[in-house]
Image (cartoon, coloured by chain):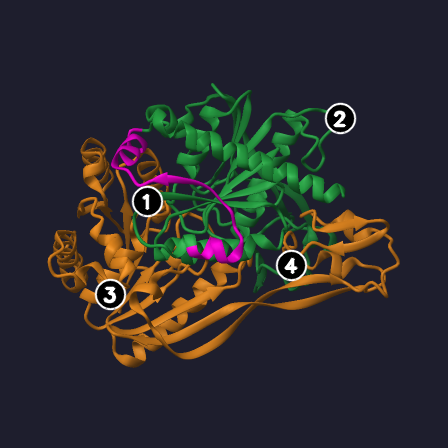
Chain colours: A green, B orange
Amino acid sequence: MIFAVASGKGGTGKTTVITSLAAIWEGPVTLVDLDVEEPNLHLFLKPKVMRETAAMLEVPVHDSDKCNLCGECAMFCQYKALAIMGKTMLFYPEMCPGCGGCLKICPEGALSPGGREIGRIAEGQTEFGRFFMGRLRVGEAMSPPLMQQVKQRVVAQGSHAEMPGGIEGCVPDDVLIDAPPGVSCPAMHAVMDADAIVLVTEPTPFGLYDFRLAVEAFSIMHKPMGAVVNRDGIGDQGVEEYCRESGIPIWARIPNSLAVAQAYSRGEIVARKLPELNGIFQELKKRMRAAVTVSREVERA
Amino acid sequence: MREIVMISGKGGTGKTCITAAFAHLADNAMVCDLDVDAPDLHMLLAPVVEEEHAFRSGHEAVINQERCTKCGVCAELCRFGAVREDQGKYAIDSLRCEGCKVCVHFCPEQAVDFVEKHCGLWFASIMRFGPMIHARLFPGEETSGRLVALLKKEARLRAKALGLSLILCDGTPGIGCPVISSLSGANLAVVVTEPTPSGRHDLERVADLCRHFRIPVAVIVNKFDLNPDNSRAIEAYCLENGHAALGMLPYDEEVTRAMVQAKCITECPTSTFGNDLREIWKKIMAHHVGYLPL
């Protein structure tokens, strides 16, 4: 089963939840950090990185001898990554998502495919199972192409039957995905291949507002979703009321505690440092699994 | 006119609560919420909307089933895996479509339409401390960088017309497209961080991004007492790397209580957090007005 841990608002405790789940998971669990702008899982899981590779994006390389400055490419490009200025062709690589349109459209064959590094992909092992992380190059604007490549690597290494491109009949490890905060395209990309979404929030007005945005955004994917209310006890009742009204189950409540915040600040895994919280994460895991099982049964029926 | 952008790298460090307090303390400022993905500033500032505008940007491909001959060229060409084949029928997955127009252009039957996207709304408003520009991107939309650029342009135009000397912007977490867009033309990036491994790690990445665009960085360590050693280490990092260390703020649940009452923390007169924040704001203003080194 593949679970994505997401949140509308940042800093609500995604990393706390995911590292603690890893620590209590029975059997190996594959951890995938798709928060490629600011990946943090490695700071807590301290993986042994076995392989680090460049993630490349195919971008055009311009041959000025062949180019007659007709401007077809610049006119076609939807991202304004190509422009003709007087007698020169300008290319802004940061704007190019690598759609390949200009390569095909150039009537003179003056554009050929080249590569540009958009980030790094790390693969390794934690004490809980396999580990994958994407890390966007600083200055790079678009994270979805890198996230896509990380996912492809997970599929290639794990033969995950459940992910697109996976091999049928293979029993894969469970996967926990750390998604970036927010509800725009990077967050959507991180959760779109999961079987269920765990939404971490906090019971405050900001927490509620962004939680609602996330529920609204992710609902269109029709995946089972549940909430984890972190720092329970601080703030107000808004999140609880909203969950009741909208039928989003609350899978766990993590009490507001200075000890949790301090353990996190030391880079410790909360469930391990504070064993009294183990039961909460065990219960959360049970509910996550049950939600996927039920939705699969419904689908089959 | 000067522009200050509040960012954090890591989410949830207290950026918006601090921005709201600065909006309270600032004179002559245009406030701008650039966190279009998950905007929260309006909850503390309660803007009254005076103008509402649609934000349209980019296009998405839609296959016209009547004209489609099911040749599959679009699926072959799409680099984003957005063309789905289901029982011989082709359709575009709008979540994956990047609006590149390749399928539209190369379809031999001209069976792919290219429709403009209505991605969100933006507002020009007035709140108790002055004018405010803000927006709401529809969930799942992807042109947040362009919306940020539009908000900044509007904020500048209006600030100029009103004779305001400062634009104060609340930014997005991360280092990607909306953050890059919010930094464009900024005079100062104030980074709010926390003394945790992720706070420190994300601060370093976002500070590197600011350096890349040659924007000066000033750092506030929030919840410093959670881990005083880490807080001191962040200060040392700032000194070493030429970033201004503006100050430290305590872990204070009063900030959450103020939020629940829809108030800025500086509107609670007894809060030490609020008083510490006033000192930090004075430092920023001394720099802002007099161009003094921070």
Please tell me whether mark 2 sits on a helix, a strand or a loop.
Answer: loop
Q: Amino acid at mark 4?
A: Gly
Q: Nearer the viewer, residue A143 or B130?
A: B130
Query: Residues under labels 4 and 3: Cα distance?
Result: 37 Å
Query: Residues under labels 2 and 3: Cα distance?
Result: 58 Å
Residue pointed to by mark 4: B99
Q: What is the chain identity of the residue bearing mark 2?
A: A
Query: Residues under labels 1 and 2: Cα distance?
Result: 47 Å
Query: Residues under labels 1 and 4: Cα distance?
Result: 31 Å
Q: Nearer the viewer, residue A244 or B92?
A: A244
Dividing the picture into quadrants, the one containing residue B199 is top left
Residue B23 - label: 3
On the image, the x and y values in percent for residue B85 come to 80, 49
Label 1 or label 3, whichever lies nearer to me, is: 3
Residue pointed to by mark 2: A169
Please tell me whether mark 1 sits on a helix, a strand or a loop.
Answer: helix
Q: Give the residue displayed 17% in from the left and 58% down from the top.
A: B281
Q: What is the chain identity of the residue bearing mark 4?
A: B
- Crowding around mark 3 (Cα neighbors within 10 Å: few <14, some 14 to 19, many 20+) is many
Residue pointed to by mark 1: B207
Q: Give the residue displayed 46% in from the left and 25% down from the top.
A: A24
Label 4 or label 2, whichever lies nearer to me, is: 2
Query: Residues under labels 1 and 3: Cα distance?
Result: 23 Å
The magenta-colored residue range is A241-266
Image check: B236 left or right of B112?
left
